[in-house]
Image (spheres, rainbow, N blue to C red):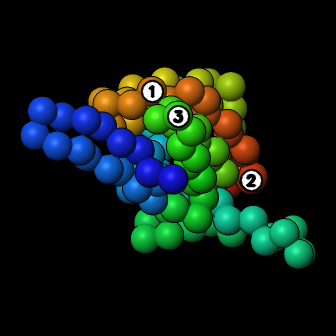
Amino acid sequence: MKGQMQTELGQVVIDEEVIAKYAGMNALECFGIVGMASVNMTDGLVRLLKRDNLTKGVKVRLQDNKIYIDFHIIVVYGVSIATVTENLIQSVKYRVEKFTDMTVEKINIFVEGVRIVD
């Protein structure tokens, strides 16, 4: 599904992949987040994704022009997970809504791992 906006000059259509990439890039800017995670369901291994594979750790669904986002993240060891996730939700919600002019209805965060950062 794609998000849609009507303007006086025509219709704007936004693909879920575009929103996922934008949300992922903004999430990486949040304090306490090491990166996005990819989970292999067959063996349960969690892998830290590189910047060019961000969208594998972010899932975006559009329903009735509302955005639902799932993040699979790896956090820095020693930080408050509650604080990091609250910051992530507020920051990404604000930025994605400004970027798309659509409402972010729900953000789910799955903490898949913890890493020590040098």
**Mark 3 or mark 1, which is nearer to you?**
3
Q: Which mark is residue 6?
A: none
> Which is more toward the observer, 115 or 94?
94
Residue underneath mark 1: 103
Residue underneath mark 3: 64
Residue most extreme to the right: 43
Q: Could you tell me how far apart the alpha carbons at marks 2 and 1 are, in whole angstroms?
A: 29 Å
Q: Could you tell me how far apart the alpha carbons at marks 2 and 3 are, in whole angstroms?
A: 33 Å
> Which is more toward the observer, 106 or 73?
106
Q: Earlier in the sequence, mark 3 or mark 1?
A: 3
Residue 89 spot, x, y in % from top left? 54, 29
Q: Earlier in the sequence, mark 2 or mark 1?
A: 1
> Which is more toward the observer, 88 or 66?
66
Instruction: For residue 31, say whether it is visible.
Output: no
Q: Are marks 2 and 3 in contact (CB under 8 Å)?
A: no
User: Relative to 49, is 116 above or below?
Assistant: above
Label 2 residue SS: strand
Quadrant housing residue 8: top left
> Which is more toward the observer, 53 or 96?
96
Left or right of 90 in this view: 13: left
Q: Amino acid at mark 1?
A: Thr
User: Relative to 104, is 16 above or below?
Assistant: below
Residue underneath mark 2: 113
Q: Amino acid at mark 3?
A: Asp
